[in-house]
Amino acid sequence: ELEWKLCRLGKRAEQHEQLLPLDCEGHVTDGHDVVVPLCQVLDLDPLTEDGMDPDLREHVQFFKGPLGVIPNSVRTMAHRAPIARAFTDLNVAVMTDYGAVTPEFKRLLGYVSSFASGCLYCQAHMILASERFGASEDRLNDVFDFEGSSHFTEAEKAALAFAQAATAVPNAVTAAVG
């Protein structure tokens, strides 16, 4: 039995929302075949919080701030605590507010980058986190048409262009980008 969930999808110069079919486990399907998470292909279930090493469980609570949950990817990495800890440390280092780039804008950059890479899992997390960190509807709607948007500064437009280009072909980014 399928449930349909409204998801925000973006395309360059076109923003729309679309109903995506989900199976009873909450996995996106194409209407016929279930797109199965890698952890299921490997027969490796994400750990519950109770199943995690207590120190790691405390460490990964970071994700509940931006996402409200500990992502399945982190819960799967928890089978190898050093990997989950390193991944969490990387997220904390990148997403902490150290200065001029706001937590909201970091998530919008992540959204653009995840869209450019085609990762639906990352897109879902980044759009949720962008909203949780205060992204306005105007910024969410214009993020894929940022060049012509009045909702982004010139510096933000340059950063978005860089993120988009660097995700597509990292070594092809030049000073002309942004």
Image: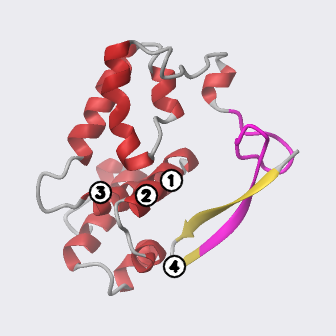
Say which label, 4 or 3, has the lower sequence index. Answer: 4
Seen at 33% across and 58% down, the residue is 163
Q: In the image, which residues are magenta?
A: 16-36
Q: Confirm or deny contact between disc 2 and disc 1 (CB under 8 A).
A: yes
Q: Nearer the viewer, mark 4 or mark 2?
A: 2
Residue at 56%, 78% in the rendered image: 14
Dominant SS in magenta: loop
Q: Nearer the viewer, residue 52 or 168?
A: 52
Q: Position of residue 46 (x, y in %)?
A: 56, 22
- For disc 4, the neighbor class at 10 Å (few under 14, some 14 to 19, many from 20) is few
- Residue identified by numbered label 2: 111
Compared with 172, 35 (above or below) is above
Q: Secondary structure at mark 3?
A: helix
Mark 4 = which residue?
13
Residue type highlighted by circle 2:
Tyr
Mark 4–mark 1 distance (CA, rounded to whole Å):
17 Å
Q: Is residue 165 visible?
A: no
Residue 98 on the magenta span: no
Q: Which residue is mark 1?
A: 123
Residue situated in front as seen by the camera: 71 or 51: 51
Q: Earlier in the sequence, mark 4 or mark 1?
A: 4
